[in-house]
Image (cartoon, rainbow, N blue to C red):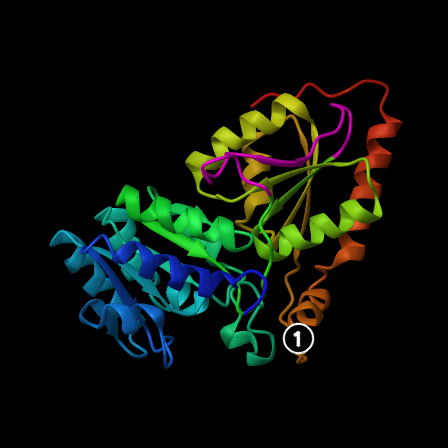
């Protein structure tokens, strides 16, 4: 296959490679593995398909982590974050178990599958559980870097990704480590700064920059409180007005978190509205029905830029 792998395929491939030299890595799936799962083919004795028993899968992973293993579990984002929410709270939060949850089909990437398979609430849930590292990589290189970091750390992780979309990650520093803030484009301090999070938020931000050059663009991979607190401090050193783009509801998302961390900044949110999609469509069509598309990003930039021009002096922005 030419071009980059999708997020979920990059996860499977990277975990399989890491397991070649780390016998403590395990792969658990909730009826998502399908035929030819690379981990199952390479390490069948460490691959477990638990079927549609998501809570039990997370509970099982907690026990395996207590036994010295590093379990990676994967299922649809709505079933991981919502159906198995109590197990996640106890396993990742209360116990602090070294379990990594990889959740494809986040946002509305399920599209035609309908509202039961959409997930615009997972960040709100996971961000409220202390101690969980939350990541939403953009592209293959970022996914691989996040999986490697999770395997090394042994800490609880929630990794959010889409369905089959394939993107080329932004340039990473030498060594492939993820920066706290990846500045895709820097602008002067008075400029409005786009902040992108996740696959579709980053895609839209990059498209908006091609239409309206001159805006800064800061890309974030992590959304947990610890990472965002440090990222907010770096953002505030360079800008005071932000447009945050993310495939999540405004409630409990990255924009809301940054608004609390940066009370003297202007934070604009481009996110999914509070409606429920009632019509079918592909991924981008369902996003547009929720008010999350390129025109919405361009309107937010125009609004934020106009407000900046109307003010006679810059706001003081502190973290």
Q: Is residue 184 magenta?
A: yes
The location of residue 250, given as percent across then percent down, is: 61, 51
Name the residue beneath numbered marker 1. Answer: 282
Of residues 14 and 275, the one nearer the viewer is 14
Does residue 237 sit above or below 293 in this rendering? Answer: above
Q: Quadrant of the C terminus?
A: top right
Q: Position of residue 227 (x, y in %)?
A: 45, 36
| Residue 87 coordinates in the image, percent (x, y) | 27, 61
Write the residue at 73% across / 21% down.
315
Give the extent of the magenta segment: 171-192
In the visual, does 116 lie left or right of 55?
Answer: right
Q: Residue furthest front?
A: 2
In percent of width and height, residue 137 lies at 51, 51
Q: What residue is drawn where x is 55% and y is 80%?
A: 113
To which quarter of the image does residue 263 belong?
top right
The residue positioned 46% from the left and 64% from the top of the image is: 8
Asked whether residue 136 appears in the rendered view, the answer is no
Position of 253 relative to 71 (above/below): above
Q: Is residue 297 left or right of residue 106?
A: right
For the residue pair 58 and 129, the one nearer the viewer reads as 58
**Quarter assignment of residue 219:** top right
Binning the other alpha carbons within 10 Å of mark 1 as few (below 14), some (14 to 19) or many (20 upward) gives few
């Amino acid at each position: 296959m030419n071009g980059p792998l999708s997020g979920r395929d990059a996860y499977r491939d990277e975990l399989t490679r890491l397991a070649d030299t780390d016998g403590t890595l395990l792969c658990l799936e909730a009826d998502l593995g399908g035929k030819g799962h690379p981990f199952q083919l390479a390490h069948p004795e460490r691959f477990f398909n638990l079927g549609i028993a998501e809570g039990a899968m997370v509970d099982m992973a907690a026990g395996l982590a207590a036994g010295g293993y590093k379990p990676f579990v994967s299922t649809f984002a709505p079933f991981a974050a919502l159906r198995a929410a109590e197990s996640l709270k106890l396993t990742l939060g209360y116990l602090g178990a070294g379990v990594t949850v990889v959740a494809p089909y986040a946002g509305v990437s399920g599209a035609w599958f309908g509202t039961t398979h959409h997930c615009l609430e997972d960040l709100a849930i996971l961000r409220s559980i202390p101690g969980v590292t939350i990541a939403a990589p953009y592209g293959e290189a970022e996914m691989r870097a996040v999986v490697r970091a999770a395997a090394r750390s042994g800490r609880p992780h929630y990794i959010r990704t889409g369905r089959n979309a394939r993107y080329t990650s932004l340039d990473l520093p030498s060594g492939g480590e993820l920066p706290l803030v990846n500045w895709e484009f820097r602008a002067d301090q008075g400029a409005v700064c786009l902040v992108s999070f996740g696959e579709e938020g980053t895609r839209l931000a990059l498209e908006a920059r091609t239409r309206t050059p001159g805006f800064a663009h800061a890309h974030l991979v992590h959304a947990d409180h610890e990472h965002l607190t440090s990222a907010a401090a770096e953002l505030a050193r360079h800008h005071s007005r932000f447009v945050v783009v993310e495939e999540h509801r405004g409630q409990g998302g990255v924009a809301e978190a940054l608004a609390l961390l940066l009370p003297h900044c202007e934070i604009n949110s481009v996110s999914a509205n509070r409606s429920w999609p009632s019509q079918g469509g592909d991924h981008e069509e369902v996003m547009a029905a929720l008010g999350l598309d390129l025109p919405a990003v361009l309107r937010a930039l125009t609004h934020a830029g106009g407000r900046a021009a109307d003010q006679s002096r810059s706001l003081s922005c502190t973290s």
